[in-house]
Amino acid sequence: MQDKEVLIEIKDLCKSYDDHLVLDHINTTIHKGEVIAIVGPSGCGKSTFLRSMNLLEKPESGAIIFEGTDLLDKKTNINQVRQKIGMVFQQFNLFPNMTVRENIMLAPMKLKGMGKAEASKRAEELLSRVGLLDKAEAYPGNLSGGQKQRIAIARTMAMNPDVILFDEPTSALDPEMVGEVLEIMKELAKEGMTMIVVTHEMGFAKDVATRVLFIDEKNIKEDSEPKEFFENPKNPRLQEFLSKVR
Amino acid sequence: MKKKRYLLCIAVMMLFILGITGCGKKDEVQVSEVTCVDDLEGKNIGVQIGTTGDIYASDYEGDEAGTKITRFNKGTDAVQALKQGKVDCVIIDEQPAVAFTNKNSELSILEEEFAIEEYAICVAKDNQELTANINEALATLKENGTLASIISNYIGDDTKGKSPYQSPEGIVRENGTLTMATNVAFPPYEYYENGVATGIDVDMARAVADQLGMELVVSDMEFDSIIIAVQSGKADVGVAGMTVTEDRLKNIDFTESYTTAKQVIIVNNGNASNELSLKEKFHQTFIEQGRWKYIPQGLLNTLIITICAGMIGIILGFILAIIRVAHDRNEEKSTLLKVLNGIAKVYLTVFRGTPVMVQVLIMYYVVFAAVKVNPLFAAILAFGLNSGAYVAEAVRAGIMSIEIGQFEAGRSLGFTYGQTMIYIILPQAVKNALPAMCNEFIALLKESSIVGYIGLMDLTKAGDIIRSNTYEAMIPLCSVAVVYLIIVMILTAGVSRLERRLKKDAR
C-alpha cells in the first residue's frame, strides 16, 4: 500500500460545535485506490469527519491536503476541488424537480461545459452501469430508496471524481434494498475507485474495505486492515463496540 | 366545463349584488328636518373634505347638541349620501348645489345662504412671479369681459351654453405648460363632459394660460391633495373653486379672486323623482356621452401599474430573499453580507409595516416633491417597492422550505453558492412560494385602486367619474367590481395551471 500515491492527507484536524469539541487532532493519510470504512458508535463524529473532507463542515484548525492543495488555505477554490470529491448522502438528496437523466446531466453541463448530447450519453452509460437505464425519464419521487441511492451514485460519478465520500449510504434504506446499493459500491471498489465510507454495514467493511477506521471519543482509535480489525481488535472500546454490533 | 364554472361564478356574483341593492331600495328616505341654518345643531352634516363648507361646518363639530360632520372625498359622494338619507344635509358651494339639485328632484337648496366667499387660484409661495403674472392676466380678462362671458356660459338659465370660451387665434405657446390641479367633480366649475374636463375653472385657467402664452394641462386629483400638489410643484396652480382661508394662506399663496360664491345647504325634500329602470340606468351609465370609455381607459392604467409593479416586486423580492437566506444560512458572514442583510431587514419592516396608501402618497408628494414626475411612474415605483417586500418574504419562506440536503448536494458537486441557488434551490422554492406570490399579486391589483389619490385614473377612479356624472352608484360600482373579479379569476386560473404543470415533476 505504501507504494501507492497519496490522495488525501489529514493533519491535526479539529472541529467543534460552539464550545463542544467533536474532532480532536485527527491525523491520517488516504492513498489512491483505497476503500476506507469508517465505523463507530453514533455521535462519535464519524459523519462530521467525512463531511470535513469536502468542507461541508468547516474545521477550526489543521490541514486537509487533497492532491497537493490544502483545502483550508483561504486561496484554495473549494468549488473546483469539490468537483473532484464526489459525495453520496444518507438521504440521497436527488433534485426532485428534475428527471433522473437531468439529475445526472446538470453538473457536467453547467460545471464542465459538456454539451447536451454528450452529457445525455454519459448519463445513459452511468445509468446502465447502475442498472437503471429504464428510469432515465422518471422523477425521483417515483423511485424506491435503493433506486434513488443508485442514481445518486451515478450523479456523483458523472463528474469523474478522484474520490467518493459515502455518508451512511444504506442507513435510510429498507433492508431488502441495502444489497443492491452495496453491490454497486463493491463494483466501484473493484474498478479502483477511491472510496471513504461511513457505514454501519460490518459486512461491507469486512469484505470490501481495504482499511477500517474506528472513531470514538473525538479521534481515530483503531486503523487497520479488515481482517486484523475484526479478528484482533486492540482498542478496548472497539472490542466492546464489535461485541454489540455482531 | 371550467369556463362554464367561471361564468356561473360571475352570474351568481351579479345576482348577489342585485339582491343587495334591491334590499337597499326598500327603505324610505326620511324628509330632512333641516329648514334653516339654526337647525344644523345636532344633525349629521355632509361636506366635501377640505372645502370651505367643511371648515365652516367644523365649527359645529363637538358641540353640546352632538352635531356630526361626515366628510366625503367628493361633492357628488356627499350628495349621494344625502339622497340615501345617510346625512341630514350637505353644505356646499352654490353653483355645484344648483347643478346637483337640477339633476336630482328630491334635493333642494335652502333659501338662507350659509356664507359668502371668494374663489381664487392658489400658487406655491415661492412662485410669486407666477402669482403676479396670473393677477395681471386676470385683470385683463375681467376688463375685456372674457371672465364674465365664461361664467355666464355656465351659470344663468338664459345665457348657459351661449358663449363658450375659445382661445384667440395665433397664440404662441412658448412659455411651457401650466399644470392645473383640480378635483373634477364640482360642476359647473369643473366636471367631465364627453370624457374631457370642462367648466368655469377650466375655461378660466385656459384663458389665463392663453394670456401667458402657456399650454394648459389639467390634473384631476382628490380635493385635499390639491394644495399639497401645488406646494410640491406637482402642479403650477390649484384651480378648484377654492376659497381663500387663513389656514390655507399659511401654506400657499392666492391670486386675486376671480369670482364670488355662496355656501348653501342642500336638503332632501322627499320628492324622489321616478326611479330609472335598470335598463335606463345602464344606458345612462355606459351609453350616454360614451361614458363606457372610462372603463377600458382606467383598466389599462390598473393593468399597467399591476404588471410593472409586479415585475419590480419579483426582481426586488428575489434579491432581498437571497440576501436574507444567505445571511441566515452562512456560518461565516462577511461585513458586506451583514450590511446588506441589515438594509433588507429595515426595508421589509418599513414596507410591510405601513399602509401602501401612505407609501404611494409619500412617494408622490414627498420623495418626488421637488421633481415633476408622471404619477403613473410614482405609483408603479411605490407599488413595486411595496410588492418587493411581500414577495421577498414569500420567496424566503419558499427557500427555507427546501431541505438543506438539496443545498449540500449542489455544493458537493462543485456548484458555487450562487449556482446552487439558481440551478437547484430557486426552481423548487418558486414552486413553493407560488401560492403566496399569487395572493400578493391579487392584492396588488386590488390595492392599486387607491391611485386616484395622486391624480391617476385607474379602474376604480373610472367608475367614480361615471358615478359623479350620473349620481347613480350601483351600476358603475358593480361593473368595476365585476371587472376586478374577472381579472382576479383569470389570474388565479393561470397560476393554478402553472402550479399543476410544476407539480407534475415534484412527486
Image: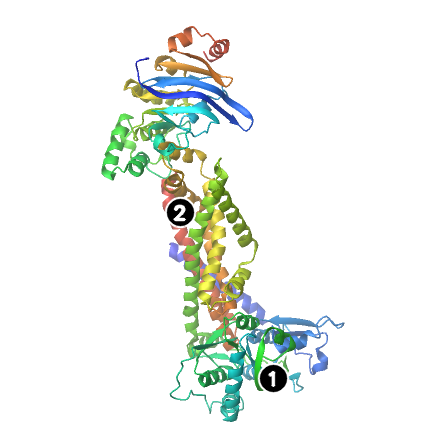
- Examine the image and state in which quarter residue B425 appears: top left
Residue B364 against residue B310 in the figure, above or below: below
Where is mark 2, residue-wise? B499
Depth order, front residue of A219/B394: A219
Mark carried by residue B159: none
Q: Mark 1 belongs to which subunit?
A: B
**Alpha carbon of mark 2 to alpha carbon of mark 1: how far?**
62 Å
| Residue shown at 67% from the left, 76% from the top | B57
The N terminus of chain B lies in which quarter of the figure? bottom left
**Where residue A107 sits: x, y (%)?**
32, 35
Residue B287 against residue B324 in the figure, above or below: below
- Examine the image and state in which quarter residue A97 appears: top left
**Where residue A136 sits: x, y (%)?**
29, 34
- Asked which secondary structure carries label 1, the reply is strand
Depth order, front residue of A6/B169: A6
* Callout 2–callout 1 Cβ contact below 8 Å: no
Mark carried by residue B118: 1
Q: Residues within 10 Å of mark 2 (few under 14, many from 20)?
A: some
The amino acid marked with disc number 1 is: Glu
- Asked which secondary structure carries label 2, the reply is helix
Q: Residues within 10 Å of mark 1 (few under 14, many from 20)?
A: some
Drawn side of residue B205 relative to residue A35, left or right:
right
Query: N-terminal of the two: label 2 or label 1?
Result: 1
Residue A4 against residue B443 in the figure, above or below: above
